[in-house]
Amino acid sequence: MKHIRSMIAAMLVLLLMLPCAAQAAKANTRYTAYTNRSTYVYKKASTGSNKKSVSVNTKVYVVGVDGDFCKVQNSKGSATGYVLTSCLSRSKVSDDPSWRSKVVKMDWFNEGNAAFKKNSYAYMYDIYTVITIRIKRMGGSNHADVEPATASDTAKLRKIAGGKFSWESHAVILRVNGKYIACGINTMPHGDQTIKNNKYDGQFCLHMVNSITHGSGEVNANHQASIERAYEWAHE
């Protein structure tokens, strides 16, 4: 019986070692990959760590895996970071730039408010997840207060937010009436809603150049930075 218990213990130790061996094997494999969207290279395997934006089809070299992230290097191996595995492909992706040249920055009070009228629908493109959702402007005067058009659009908005709605600003392109406008949004539901079956309890904010918040009456620096990122991404 004692001999059998010793054999079982040895087998358990071996089983525990197998994942580590597989991880080590992955770490010793270096292969080429490309970003399949505009995304970030993070300092650590966490979206909360320091990050640097990279454009679609950026070439990297994968050297390991850490949870939802791939550990990547530059060609010389002198710089290392982490990219979400979902943002990498083994080959380049097609990226039609034809509409990107049409993206503009629009002053909210001069043109933006009139371009995206209340109670009208539009499309919003997130530059990092390459997700497009349909939205409705339900109100707002200092900026646009908008809602996802359907429950499906709410699910897409959640993906844009990384699985959890937040006040973090995201860089997006608004497509409305033939115009393409660089904007910044948050994803946190708040305030009133007019679409009762979209599974989104409230509205979220969409900002353009020089738009201001309802509460402080000031221009939000984070949203203005997102507008710049969206515009630069479109014209890179």
Image (cartoon, rainbow, N blue to C red):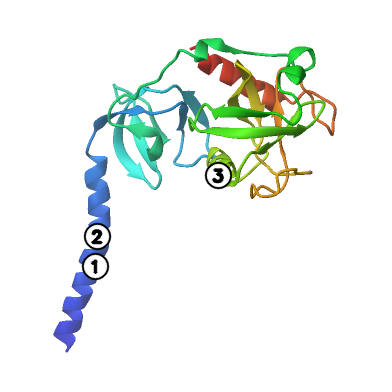
What is the crowding at mark 2: few (fewer than 14 residues within 10 Å), some, or many (at least 20)? few
* Cα separation between marks 1 and 3: 46 Å
* Cβ atoms under marks 1 and 3 closer than 8 Å: no
- Taking the view exactly as shown, the residue that stands out farthest to the left is 3
* Cα separation between marks 2 and 1: 6 Å
What is the crowding at mark 3: few (fewer than 14 residues within 10 Å), some, or many (at least 20)? some
Task: Specify whether residue 210 is in view.
Answer: no
Q: Position of residue 127 (x, y in %)?
A: 52, 26
Task: Specify whether residue 32 is in view.
Answer: yes
Inspect the image, locate mark 3, and give the three-letter code of the amino acid beneath it: Ser
The residue at which mark 2 appears reads as: 17
Left or right side of 92 for 104: right
Query: Which residue is located at x 20 percent, y 82 percent?
Result: 5
| Disc number placed over residue 209 in the picture, else none | none
| SS at badge 3 | helix
Splitting the image into 4 quarters, where does residue 149 fall?
Answer: top right
* Cβ atoms under marks 2 and 1 closer than 8 Å: yes
In front: label 2 or label 3: 3
| Labels 1 and 3: the sequence-earlier one | 1
Inspect the image, locate mark 1, and give the three-letter code of the amino acid beneath it: Val
Q: Quadrant of the N terminus?
A: bottom left
Indicate whether 125 appears above or below 22.
above
The residue at which mark 3 appears reads as: 152
| Labels 2 and 3: the sequence-earlier one | 2
Which of 70 and 233 lies nearest the eye of the viewer? 233
The residue at which mark 1 appears reads as: 13
